[in-house]
Structure formats: structure tokens, C-alpha cells
Image: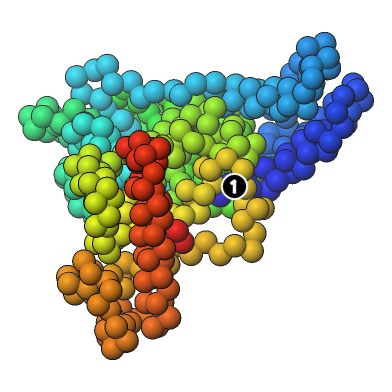
Amino acid sequence: MAFESLTQKLNDIFKKLRGKGKLSEADVKQAMKEVRLALLEADVNFKVVKDLISKITERAIGQEVMESLTPAQQVIKIVNEELTSLMGSTQSKVDFSKEITIIMLVGLQGSGKTTTAGKLGKLLSKNGKKPLLVAADIYRPAAITQLKIVGEKVGLPVFTMGQQDPVDISKASVDYAKKHNHDVVIIDTAGRLHVDDDLMNELVNISHAVDPSEILLVVDSMTGQDAVNVAEEFNNRLQLTGLILTKLDGDSRGGAALSVKAVTGCPIKYVGMGEKLDDLEIFHPERMASRILGMGDVLTLIEKATADFDLKKAQELEDKLKTQSFDLNDFKDQLSQVKKMGSLDQILNMIPGFSQQKLKGVEIDDKELSRVEAIINSMTLEERSNPSIINGSRRKRIAAGSGTAIQDVNRLLKQYAQTKKMIKQFAGSDKSRKRSKQKLPFLNF
Ligand SMILES: Nc1nc2c(ncn2[C@@H]2O[C@H](COP(=O)(O)OP(=O)(O)OP(=O)(O)O)[C@@H](O)[C@H]2O)c(=O)[nH]1
């Protein structure tokens, strides 16, 4: 995940501050010098760093902080607030005020536009919208096919007219959307390797023809300050309403995310956190600041956990927990719930205190989840509901069927037995029974 190294450096600086108890002005200034260096090393724009540090320092050497009982904590709070404000303070929402919300996605080739069109469509349709995807990149023939494939994967229709004028395609797509009750139109426009006049003219013409509610620039966060420059160039010609920063799951240093709002004035509206079509998140500056400072992001985690929450299934599970009839089918169901939330790496990053550094040496293996699923899939229905019948020869058959080793099957059965034992204790106490209404026990990998 981006910011890894920045988070580590900031944590080290704050640890030193905490160790000091009372802080002198010199202590704060020294810490700010180090924060400044860490931000520059994370590729944050030079001017942005300068302004940020002067704001933080001014507040941090104020009386309130110096005389507080927990001065280091106050300094961290100020850094958190200023980072949040740097990225736009609050969530910048998409404008859905018109009957049809037209969203133009623009950006350079390879920034992730087509993938993002699918991700955005999926996210919006989860929120009750009826999006239409529009293939307006006519120069790269594969782009139309790519959008069709993405559309199929996310279950959304794709409007295409082949290699015709992108302005005509865009206009026709809006008419089509009106006739077919779509309330969102997402136009995937052409990209180029560099910003050029032809591209800009075409985008300006499309924007005049369809009067979009949003022109969102898709930028690759891995390109660092180049992403900020590209955003400035696009904004000068197109008046962007916002940005989508992709590939924030990669090892970018994070500079683009921290600088782009301050430099261009354009807010980040979404961030791409992976290659899967579920990996698009609404951008919340305060939550991102919290992640950068290694404080986790519990709110996003809860949202992910509840997004696909199936109340009926949860009720069934609760009944099973009470009667202690939790079997391997339920075990598998829980596994799918965890998998829906994203990769284990992503999930752990949102838990406060679970910094990458602490996870060093701990292998986070998403394959383990798939392995467990394969093992359970290779069992008969009878075995899943009554695992005690799984003897030696059955174990051998299950391992062969799932392409795993007998030790893997043994390990899973042991984990299941432990979970069941835990549930027994859990259901046994009145206090925990009350708790079971709110929380499902997590699997123990
Ligand atoms: N890791 C990661 N990869 C991403 C993300 N978003 C897009 N990608 C990948 O980036 C590559 C380029 O994405 P495309 O959607 O083809 O890019 P594009 O901007 O449409 O490219 P052109 O059609 O050539 O203009 C693909 O391999 C995507 O899977 C992201 O958030 N994280």
C-alpha cells in the first residue's frame, strides 16, 4: 500500500516525541524538520510541504500544546488535522442533482480509465443507480472490447457505435440512456501517451455537447508528481470537477495524493485500491490522513463489512451459534464474507496499530483463504455438516480432490474444531450471548 514508508517515518518521529514528556520549542522544531524530510521523500510537492510545515509548527508551538499534559499527542492531532485539510477536509461528493448524471472519465493512456469506468459503475449500481457505460475511445480498437468485457463482468450495459465521432457517440448515448431509464452515464474517453491539443479539443467538444455533471480525471498515483502536472494541464483546459487516483494499492510513495488538491484545487473523489472491480473507494480525506499516520481506518472497514451484509444469513448463523450447530458450510460462508471485503493485506491495513512494519515477517497469504475454500468444496455434503466422520481415507480423498496436502486438510479441521469450541464457550455465557447479537466471530487464520 502507498504511504508505507511515510507512515513508518512519521511513527518513528512521533515515538521520539512521546518519549520526551514535556516538549520545548526546539523539540517541536526538530520534529518538524524530520516530518518535512519524510514528506519530501514521499514525493510531496515542495511548496505544499513548506506551507504545511509552517502551519503545523505555528500551531504546535502555541501555548495550548506546550502546556498540555500530553504535548506529543497534541502535535500528532495537529498533523492529522492539517493532513486532512490538505487533502480537502471533507468528502467531495459527486453531483447527482440532474435527472441524468453524466460523468466523463478523462486521462492519459494506461491510467486505469476503462477499469475505473467499470468499478465506478459497479459502485454506483450498488447504491441504487442505473449506470450506462459508454465506449468513446475509438482510436484503440481494443478499448471498446475491453469496456465490453468490463461491462459484462460488472453486469452493466455498454453503449458502443464502433469507430464513429466520439462527440456523436456521447450525444447518442445520452439519448439512449433517457429512453432506457438510465440515471447515470459514464463516458470512457480516449487516452493519449501525453497531453496534446487534439485530445484536449476532442474532450472539450464532448463536454460542450453533453454538458456533464462531472469531468473526472483518472490519474495513476504511481507517477507521483507527474500525476499532479497532468492534473494541472487537464484542469486548465477542461475545468475538472474532481480526480480519481488509481493504483494507491501499489508502492507509490503517496506524494500525488497529498499534493494534488493543494496544487490544482481539484478534490480527489475516489481512489483505486486494486485491480479487482470492487477495489474503488470513496475518498475521505480524514480517513486517508488516519491511514497515513498508521491509525487505521475503522469506518471504511465497517462499511466494507456491512456493504454486502445479508441480514437473513446473519440471523441463521446466530441461531446456529445458539444451538451450537455451526458446521463447515457456515465456516465457508464466513470465509466468503471475509473475501468480499478485499485482500487480507487491505483489511489489515485498516486496523488501527496494524502497521506494515508490525506485520513484517508475518506472511499474509490470500491463497490460504482460497485453499480452505477448495478443501471444503471437495467434501461431500454429509462431511461438511458432520465433520467428525472425516477419517483418514476421507482426508486423503479430500486433499487429492482439492489439490492440497493432507496436512492442509488436518489444519483446517483443527481450526474448525477450535472455532466450534470457542463458540461453545461464547454461547455458554449470558454476557457473550448478548454480544453475539452484534458481532459474528471471526475466523482464526
Ligand atoms: N493495482 C491496480 N491496478 C489498477 C488500478 N486501476 C487500474 N489498474 C490497472 O492498470 C492497467 C491499465 O488500466 P486500463 O483501465 O486499461 O487503463 P486505461 O486508462 O483505460 O488505458 P487506455 O485505454 O490505454 O487509455 C490495467 O492493468 C488495470 O488492471 C488500481 O487501482 N490498482
State the residue in front, 223 or 83: 83
Residue 270: tell me if it is visible: no
At horizontal 79% and vertical 16% (from top left) the residue drawn is 68
Residue 87, percent across and down? Answer: 57, 27
Image check: 250 left or right of 332? right
Residue 351: tell me if it is visible: yes
Residue 176, percent across and down? Answer: 11, 33
Residue 370, percent across and down? Answer: 36, 66
Q: Quadrant of residue 420?
A: bottom left
At horizontal 79% and vertical 20% (from top left) the residue drawn is 69
Image check: 180 left or right of 373? left
At horizontal 72% and vertical 40% (from top left) the residue drawn is 11
The image shows residue 384, relative to residue 306, as above or below, that is: below
> How many labels sit on residues?
1
Badge 1: how crowded within 10 Å, few (<14), some, or many (20+)?
some
Image check: 146 left or right of 411? left
The residue that disc 1 covers is 354
Residue 236, percent across and down? Answer: 50, 25
